[in-house]
Image (cartoon, coloured by chain):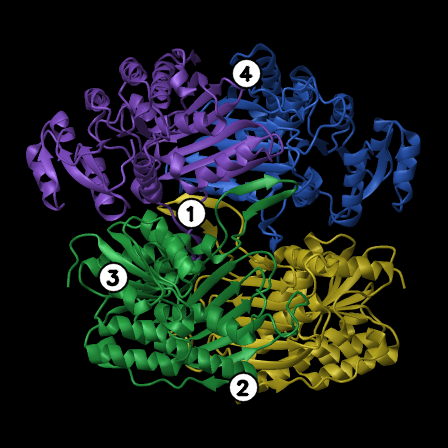
Chain colours: A purple, B green, C blue, D yellow
């Protein structure tokens, strides 16, 4: 179903991510408007809606989806609330952009998958925004173009300045490495079949309970190997790098760029301090791409299958973290809808 | 006057630049739509309008501005047609984004300036898109912040792959160096007071009549000096670089970045091949910024004064090119409207 | 024992490495001269000696060491010949620079170690030339200085253009990764306690029998983890990189540098094509340092213990390659001589 | 005349540069030794000689040259003393390495030139050490190779942290830009025919009398143009860069390299703080090359003509500095000896 006019979007969840998406749709995206917002905190929902002409505020996701003028749904509520919202949206056959994770675990992701399969067509794009980052797109094109031959290894770095209180080892996989998991699957066009985790003696900058950094090793169905440094208390900045090593060359993304300054005996520049700074343009492109595809009547980008597979790999990763042994990924059969 | 709804834009001129802006407003800009297009080639205007819902096609600029739903004007016709279109728009008190050059010479630019001064408020933003390039914005902020002290020199490189037939030496100044002229004025917040041109023996890759490359030296009212390499047949790519040298450090923009590839005995990456590739995001930000400001009821960005001053410096530059001597810039008094 | 005059060196082995050292001592090193050369191929020895004033040619290592004017020995014969030559030199209490590997296996290395321990003082420097590379020296100083805190991980890349005929998987460890093994021990001041090897599906550019590339993971006594990409048929160049990740920052060496060229649509530069090109200066500094220390009457640099420990880690590495399982390193007790 | 044994060098002048050369010959150079030193400060000469076996101390340059075992002369005394020492050495037909400047002015340089021409063969190498810097050598080879076509422009940066007391504007040309003058002549194989100087408003970090920085423009006999930023109080480091712009590409040297560090929100590295740090290896190679050539019985490298031409260009440069006008270089005819 094409949407010829401006796309009315219901934004579910108005926390940090959700309110950023509301602002984005309002200010930066062509062809869409925020028609409704929902938050369990009704006051927050009202406050967010107040700035947007014609935007309704709700405390119930389904009610927000049923609001007048709603053509599509952007889910940015906390992960545990995703399944219900996704099933509500699929029941209404509404196009969805669902922030990652699809759902917090593989079993619930599979239930969403089953619902979409029953619907018979894709309606959900999952919010793996790196697929819209300029350099990732260039790397994907370079690998797909074949000039460097088959990709053999990926070397990935994922560094955060510091963790908020309550950040757990499992979250290092589920919240952070999940991006490398999706990027690896997408860049190589392969499934991840096994995960190992090696833990160095932790940094003294890490909270007590956190073995930080870690080296996560992913093996893929095509025999490639990706190693991921996850370091969530690196102190100096937010830094994402990836080098693909292929048969006839290698290609690296994520080198710091921007202004090159000479001052006080040093040359160099500033490291981004958070993901908003680093991936701002990728988020803009992601949402614009979703709006454009939705208006053309199609669903593209990362699928429910991608969300489910990432969840399954994360589960194996968390088990590998605890057990210290190589852990195989248990993946359901891929339905033809996602072929 | 605020524009609460979607801004209806009349695009004057549907050549390469104009049709790119039509596509941009249609696909990438939030809060605006193309309400009318105008081209002296009526067929081209019709063709462009055909793809846009509710877009009228005209062969007369004033008629396009009077089209229903037109709130603002984007002028992208050839330079010689700018003056008339600008005066038409100002007569209607319509907000304008005018592609550079404002007009082809200082005298006509001054007539537009007089018209806007008579109107009593700014209505025109001139299309110096570099002011919206991420790195230029960072450089401006760094210099304004004062951490490096006062800027003393700028070293600028402006390289094009090759010139189209009919490209003249004067166009090296008027079409190319004009960007460095505006960037120098803007980065330093100073006027350019004199221009010198030094011509090396030309490249054998340059057409017969063209002394290419050239070194253009700009002196400013604050005593700074900018040197500009203009090389419009450099062969290898489109490359714009600028290093500001200040009292306590220097800062450079325009280093190639993006993917870093090892292959075939070389490390490195791809150089952009044209300005569309290099400044795509800057154009998007420029137009979005104009739309946003216009909807808020204000006019910001490069002014008619900036367009006039650039034209006056270009005239001095072209005289310096012919005479081989340092040529002072003859600048009118700056009206208080542009203080 | 100090050597006040020019140091007379017997060079054992005049193959590629040995003849390069002969040339080096003759042309680039201050305070030394080649007093004798030895090669089992007498003709080759004669030929090498011919160009050097006062240089004797031998086919027997001990005879070369006994040649008039010989004050010190540089061993550059094939690995299996090292043990005998080392024992000959130690029997004469002659200072030695022994090309890596010290000996081909841990057992023979231990015999050399025992001989030096019996001698009661160090006489042997092992040829791990990376310790003399400018950037490695800077990295060591940065880590030792403590500004970045304790080192947690090393990410290493070791890439060769292509393998010669007969190159085996074990040689990937023994000839190539041995450098990262020594560098890890030296940079961190820790022993390596375990090795794991992960093998991606091999590159189609690798010879049939060679699973190339591989990811080798080293664990250290201090809890650090080093991952090493060894790729001996990478095709594009000889490239050695190392990033140390520490508690408050990271530092990387081995980025390509030298001329930065814009041409044919690309920016970048040339990758070194072999270790001679990449480590020429390091070899010069290594030999100069050995000559200087020897003339001052001391033995410094990588020790027999370092050579033995590297051999022991290599043995574990080769076992890990075959078994596919994490393999602990079996290390003898470190004699006080090497404290 | 070949020197088969170790070359005995008399070092004239044991100030900063001279004592550094004494140390270099003693510790780092193959095939040479310091046979005598001379300084007008006899105590300083004695002190320097004391550490070197068999080294005589003198207060008279000619006496030092006549010392036993002296085969060649390295002149590192203050510039005004060069002419006499050069004439003394030429009178003895001794090979010379003379630190830059050859002599302080063109007239005295011409007298030395005449003396060498009368001698009938080259005996003097002038100490323009940049010709031995790895990157300069690569740039020269790249330009000579022709892959980029003819060189059209050079963009040069020459930055010092700060000036010592008494540093004058003329010294900005004579002591600093003289290196770019020689490099331009050498890289292009052309003479410099005219000099212009443009002075921005000076940095507040510059001493009162010094208009710092300046932009010096050199024109060459082949029609190339070199612009040189000379900034001797830049504050942040010692930085020398040069970009050659040719018909089919450009090549830049002097980008900072070495360790790439992430820390405290910044990426980057350290800028060299003085010329000793930046050009240490170039000095080593320069002296080694001179010793090697001298032992082979030849004189190579920068010639007396190069020293004279640099002096003549400097004189034009200093005149251009004062007059503010483009100043042509007045050059004698080049004797066939330097063809």
- Counting the numbered discs, the total is 4
Q: CA distance from mark 1 to mark 2?
A: 44 Å
Q: Residue at x 62, y 24 (%)?
A: C203
Within 10 Å of the Cα at label 3, are there few (<14), some (14-19), or many (20+) other Cα atoms? many
Q: CA distance from mark 2 to mark 4?
A: 76 Å
Q: Secondary structure at mark 2?
A: loop
Q: Secondary structure at mark 4?
A: loop
Camera-side residue of A11 and B167:
B167
Q: Is residue C226 above or below residue D122?
A: above
Q: Chain of mark 2?
A: B
Image x and y of residue B248, in percent: 39, 65
Within 10 Å of the Cα at label 4, are there few (<14), some (14-19), or many (20+) other Cα atoms? some
Labels 3, 2: front one: 3
Q: What quarter of the picture does the N terminus of chain B occupy? A: bottom left
Are dots 1 and 3 in contact, CB under 8 Å? no
Report the residue marked by disc 2.
B325
Image x and y of residue C297, in percent: 68, 40
Image x and y of residue C66, in percent: 85, 32
Are dots 3 and 2 in contact, CB under 8 Å? no
Q: Chain of mark 3?
A: B
Q: Chain of mark 4?
A: C
Report the residue marked by disc 1.
D267
Label at residue C329: 4
Q: Secondary structure at mark 1?
A: strand
Q: Residue furthest left?
A: A43
Within 10 Å of the Cα at label 1, are there few (<14), some (14-19), or many (20+) other Cα atoms? many
Q: CA distance from mark 3 to mark 4?
A: 82 Å
Q: Earlier in the sequence, mark 3 or mark 2?
A: 3
Q: Chain of mark 1?
A: D
Label at residue B67: 3
């Amino acid at each position: 179903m094409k949407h010829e006019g401006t796309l009315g979007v219901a934004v579910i969840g108005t926390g940090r991510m959700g309110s950023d998406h509301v602002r984005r749709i309002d200010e930066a995206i062509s062809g869409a408007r925020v028609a409704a917002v929902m938050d369990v905190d009704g006051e927050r929902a009202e406050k967010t809606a107040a700035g947007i002409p014609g935007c309704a505020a709700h405390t119930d996701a389904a009610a927000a989806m049923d609001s007048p003028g709603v053509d599509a749904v952007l889910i940015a509520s906390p992960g545990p609330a995703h399944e219900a919202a996704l099933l509500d949206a699929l029941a209404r056959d509404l196009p969805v952009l669902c922030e990652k994770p699809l759902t917090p675990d593989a079993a619930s992701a599979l239930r969403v998958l089953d619902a979409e399969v029953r619907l018979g067509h894709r309606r959900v794009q999952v919010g793996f925004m790196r697929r819209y980052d300029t350099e990732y797109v260039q790397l994907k094109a370079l690998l797909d173009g074949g000039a460097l031959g088959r990709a053999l290894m990926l070397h990935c770095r994922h560094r955060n300045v510091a963790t908020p209180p309550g950040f757990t080892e499992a979250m290092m996989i589920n919240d952070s490495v999940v991006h490398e998991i999706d990027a690896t699957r997408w860049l190589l066009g392969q499934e991840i079949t096994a995960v190992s985790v090696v833990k160095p003696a932790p940094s003294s900058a890490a909270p007590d309970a956190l073995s930080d950094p870690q080296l996560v090793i992913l093996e893929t169905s095509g025999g490639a190997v990706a190693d991921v440094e996850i370091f969530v208390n690196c102190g100096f900045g937010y830094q994402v790098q990836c080098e693909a090593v292929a048969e006839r060359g290698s290609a690296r993304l994520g080198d710091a760029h921007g202004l090159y300054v000479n001052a006080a005996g040093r040359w160099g520049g500033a490291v981004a301090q958070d993901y908003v700074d680093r991936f701002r343009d990728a988020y803009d492109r992601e949402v614009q791409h979703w709006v454009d595809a939705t208006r053309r009547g199609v669903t593209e980008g990362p699928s429910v299958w991608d969300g489910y597979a990432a969840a399954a790999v994360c589960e194996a990763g968390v088990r590998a973290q605890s057990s210290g042994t190589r852990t195989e990924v248990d993946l359901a059969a891929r339905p033809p809808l996602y072929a």
